[in-house]
Amino acid sequence: MDRPTALLRQLLILELIQAHIARELVRVKAQMREEGLHIIERQDVGMDIRIEFRIGDHYDEAVFMRKMLEAEAANRAKRTGMISR
């Protein structure tokens, strides 16, 4: 079992990371507004996430592979020490 202080430290660090993530979400959404990027529809379907979007008068769509996004997120979390895998 981890020392109680180690678990408390981990909790505090994760709370700070969560606050950073919340600020980053606000920043990204503000940048999307500035660039006129609007999500029309998002579909989480099986292995993919499909997003239909609009930039100004131009409509388009993008498909992101869920496994690739999960791997990138896990890699970033591992580098920051959020997960130990």
Image: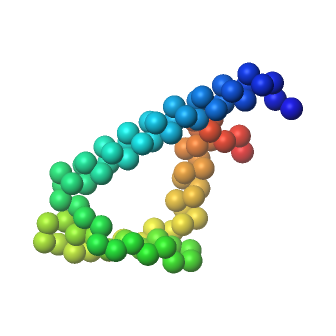
For the residue pair 44 and 8, the one nearer the viewer reads as 8
Residue extending farthest left = 57
Q: x, y percentage for residue 7? A: 72, 29
Residue placed at 74% from the left, 22% from the top? 5
Q: Is residue 62 left or right of residue 32?
A: right
Quadrant position of residue 84: top right
Q: Is residue 38 left or right of residue 44?
A: left
Quadrant position of residue 42: bottom left
Q: Which quadrant of the figure contains the N terminus? A: top right
Quadrant position of residue 20: top left
Q: x, y percentage for residue 28? A: 32, 48
Residue placed at 45% from the left, 41% from the top? 21
Residue placed at 25% from the left, 48% from the top? 30
Q: Which quadrant of the figure contains the C terminus? A: top right
For the residue pair 76 and 82, the one nearer the viewer reads as 82
Q: x, y percentage for residue 82? A: 62, 39
